[in-house]
Image: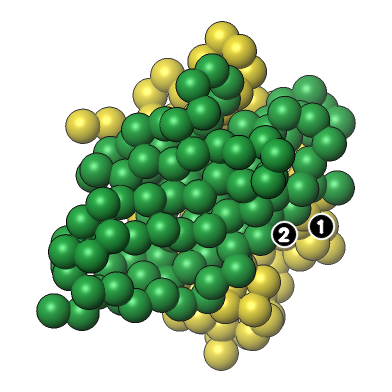
Amino acid sequence: DARVTQTPRHKVTEMGQEVTMRCQPILGHNTVFWYRQTMMQGLELLAYFRNRAPLDDSGMPKDRFSAEMPDATLATLKIQPSEPRDSAVYFCASGFNLGTEHYEQYFGPGTRLTVT
Amino acid sequence: AQSVTQPDIHITVSEGASLELRCNYSYGATPYLFWYVQSPGQGLQLLLKYFSGDTLVQGIKGFEAEFKRSQSSFNLRKPSVHWSDAAEYFCAVGVRSDFGNEKLTFGTGTRLTIIP
């Protein structure tokens, strides 16, 4: 049963610290998405990659956030320095082109980040 | 810009009763529509999707949804709910972005509570 995995599942850190979240997409998927979920804003798309190339990171605060795909099996989202307002659940999703360019996205379980 | 409205923040239904969750979208072209379900502490799971063709689509767990272009709606239905259906339900619209790929815009979600 293929699924998206995310680590860590929970992270508590102090303001100013660096946070790295990792995602392993489903093998064979060529698109990876990072979302943030908060009570106030709901689900927001932060960034996404296709074939490891960043396509759109317009939803991401670029002064402190960065997203990369070092290889096809790993996507990372980093926050440096972290702030209390970054507290949220961060989801990774992966997808594949169905031939009609209409993606299905498969979500990981999320990383719950708390910044104190 | 595209948007998705889920007018019901919270719905309570008795076990065995029928269910309808509302979703309205705003988009200038034919949308690609999705329903996802999120159980507490979990990621989002795809219930069903509409790309084209038959406007009544069947999904997993006994759910179905009907696309009504005239009403810009994609309501989710189930004839008889089970206690395990208690979760948060998200409607999403997929649109072509400036980069030529689909991005998902999510509604704010409807929380479903099942009472015995």
Q: Residue at x 78, y 41 (%)?
A: B27
The single residue placed furthest to the top in the displayed view is: A99
Label 1 residue SS: loop
Task: Read off the chain for label 2.
Answer: A
| Residue indicated by mark 1 | A62
Mark 2 near mark 1, Cβ–Cβ under 8 Å?
yes
| Residue indicated by mark 2 | A65
The picture quadrant where one finds residue B58 is top left
Q: Residue at x 42, y 31 (%)?
A: B57
Q: Are marks 2 and 1 on the same chain?
A: yes
In depth, the one of A86 and A43 nearer the eye is A43
Q: Residue at x 78, y 23 (%)?
A: B100
Label 2 sits on what residue type? Phe
Residue B93 lies, with reference to residue B21, above or below; the image says above
What separation in Å lies between label 2 and label 1 (alpha carbons)?
5 Å
Rendered yellow, the chain in question is A
One can see residue A80 in this view:
yes
One can see residue A19 in this view:
no
Task: Read off the chain for label 1.
Answer: A
Rendered green, the chain in question is B
Residue B105 lies, with reference to residue A100, above or below; the image says below
Label 1 sits on what residue type? Lys
